[in-house]
Amino acid sequence: MSLNNIPSYHPGESMRHRITGFVLAWLILIGLGANLTQAAETKLSLLLDKIEATPGETVLAGIRLELKEGWHTYWRYGGDAAQPPRITWKLPPGITAGNIRWPLPVKEESSGLYSYAYHDDIVLLVPLTVGSDLKTGSIKLNADVFWLECKESCIPRNGTVSRTLKIGATDKSSPEASSLAAWNNKVPPPAVDLKFKADWSKSMADDERQLTIELAEKQGFYFKDFYPFENEDYEIGGKTTFEKAEGKSLSLTKTLLNWGETWPGKISGVAVLAKQNGENTRAYEISVTLGEGFETEKASTTLTIPASGNAAPEGAEATPVEESRGGWPLMLLFAFVGGFILNFMPCVLPVISLKILGFVHQSKEQPRRIFQLGLLYGVGVLFSFWILAGLVIGVQSAGNLANWGMQFQNPQFLVLMTLLVTLVALNFFGVFEITGGRLTSAASNAASRNGNMGAFFNGILATVLATPCTAPFLGTALGFAFTQPPAGILILFTAVAMGLAFPYILLSWNPTWLGILPKPGAWMERFKVFMGFPMIGTAIWLYTIARLHFGEKGDLWMGLLLVFVAMAAWVYGEFVQRGSSRKGLALGVSAACLLFAYGWILEKELNWRDPVGPVTTNAGNVSKGKNGILWQPWSEEAVATARAEGKVVLVDFTAKWCANCQINKKTSIEIDKVHQKLKSISGVTFKGDYTFYDSRITAQLQKFGRSGVPLVLVYAPGAEPPILLPELLTPGIVLEALEKASGKS
């Protein structure tokens, strides 16, 4: 959207003013270019059983994932904390993709969590139907693939594969045909001649029941296990209890957790069976109606979907697990409401001061002009969120995990933001002015008579300062967004942007609501100076984070950097803008300060392009909180060991740049009541410091559906899943979770 196309925008506005606004916007956004790269451990390819097919025939396609030794991915139902691969086909008209055919996985257990995994090499099979009226010639088959690549932690990966298929008069097999046929034999077929029945055996809680599945006698098989398909209304646990020994039992029992309004009437999955001697394992796909006696599985039908759709069977939808628990409408609402609430978080306070000044200025403007500037502010917010969405898409396309606020882990971005906010604060104090044909500050320019670019810039600044904060609903929406394909990420980020900009656009739309604001006057200059203090506070906060990236030199040279930049701004404002003589000398001194700040401090002393970096924060000695809580460095192994010893465990994934994290720590975690509760239950605490990028913590955020920190977990002893605490805590929430985990609630 071009700013020149906005109604009432004056093309004669000075070029210098436009360039100034562009430079300020660029200064913020340049830091967003930091990328996280890590080579994928999986080789992705597309196999076809035919190199030439005739119209009306079916071609068997295979998405092959060749995993390096020690790595794994997941089945159509991943288990307690995993996601299945997704395939999005991009096919020409006349080609339709069928359901994915999933080979039998391996069931695994770790720390009480069950998963269904593939190791080493796996081929996911998809039948492609060639339309009977398709003309001869060559066609391109394309597929976008998402999968989790896991070892000690999981990394989401995305890849694209393509092959050319010839449509001709005869069918010609490919060299891959025999391999695909072998993989097809590993797909569990429907249990056409075997009889099963299922019924509830015990009610455990309001939303939990025990489910018993029984195999009819004298069929020559016994149960080894049952692998359930994923369902949006319920979840069947991985733990299996047998009537007799495994491989010698005709029935097994599983626990079902119900999310729907009614209990399911039919259960689908894979029955893993064995002969009487426990050998010769077979697997069959079954679907059993509860409480109706023994049934014989009917032959299944094949469902085809449009060529542009996602091929996935029931329980293996092309969208992530989280979508089924709320759906797009709810996630879009969460994104909008979360963006709206961001306006009231501490991170955005400095920008609110800019908007207050802007609204006061606007109170005497024409309604059309007021609405125009409100829209420009919204465009700035939207533009910034699209930049963030592009960054997320780029990071994930490189095969890495993205997270909310990840730019605050980038030292170049932090340095630029610290300098920018410092300059804005100095401008508020009147140290120097940004000219736009006449003296007026950038803050006053925001949404003022000549403030088109200022309004746009304020929208960008609001977005950047909002990212270290999270808000209720926002974490859920963004956690969902980070599992979506690029279009989904863009849509959800747009919804957050609309929520953030909504109150200002609404006020601009009805200017009569601005009547509650005082009239413009001399008080505005004093208010502007007063609001410089929150800005300088923000700059100090950014400084404390940025300096950590530069080792022992960080404190001194980051401080001197700000001193020399501030000196350059003062000399420029005092002797160039307000002085009457020797302006050339003053301009030279100001430029010299900036050159020294960049050349000597940034490049030589701080080596800001490739800083030494911090000492690893999630390893080393135990640290002690203000109220005596002992924080051990977090690792999955340490948590598992503590739980095995019968300990209640509290894990706090936090970051120094995360405002919500610091609020939670001071008000709800490092307090006397929590300390005493931890002592009374012999609880232990672990801290995962995410101030600097840590792929293990990123994987934990993905695992628990969070877009970023804070993430606070409370584990009971043993193998039960953890209690996931909300983003914003109260002492009562933390104490209740500890009480529940200790078994005393």
Image (cartoon, helix red, strand yellow):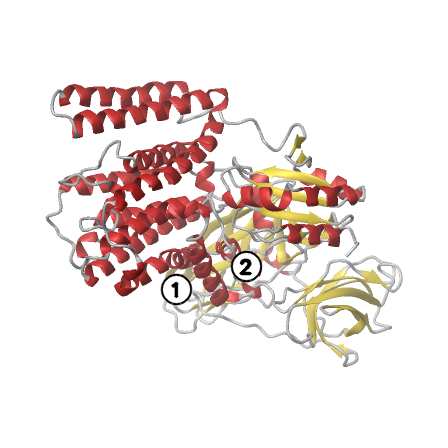
Q: Is residue 43 visible?
A: yes
- Which residue is depicted at the point 56% across and 56% down? 177
In percent of width and height, residue 208 lies at 74, 67
- The C terminus - image quarter: bottom right
Dot 2 or dot 1: first in sequence order is 1
Q: Amino acid at mark 1?
A: Pro
* Residue 424 sits in quarter: top left
Look at mark 2 in the image and give the residue it sits on. 320
In percent of width and height, residue 688 lies at 61, 39
Horizontal relation, residue 409 to residue 703: left or right: left
Q: Amino acid at mark 2?
A: Pro
Look at mark 1 in the image and give the residue it sits on. 92
Pick whichever, 490 or 199, lies toward us. Answer: 490
- The N terminus - image quarter: bottom left
Q: Secondary structure at mark 2?
A: loop
Give the foreground label among 2 and 1: 2
In percent of width and height, residue 387 lies at 36, 48
Residue closest to the far right: 244
Horizontal relation, residue 342 to residue 424: left or right: right
Rendered position, 629 above or below 81: above
Horizontal relation, residue 113 to residue 314: left or right: right
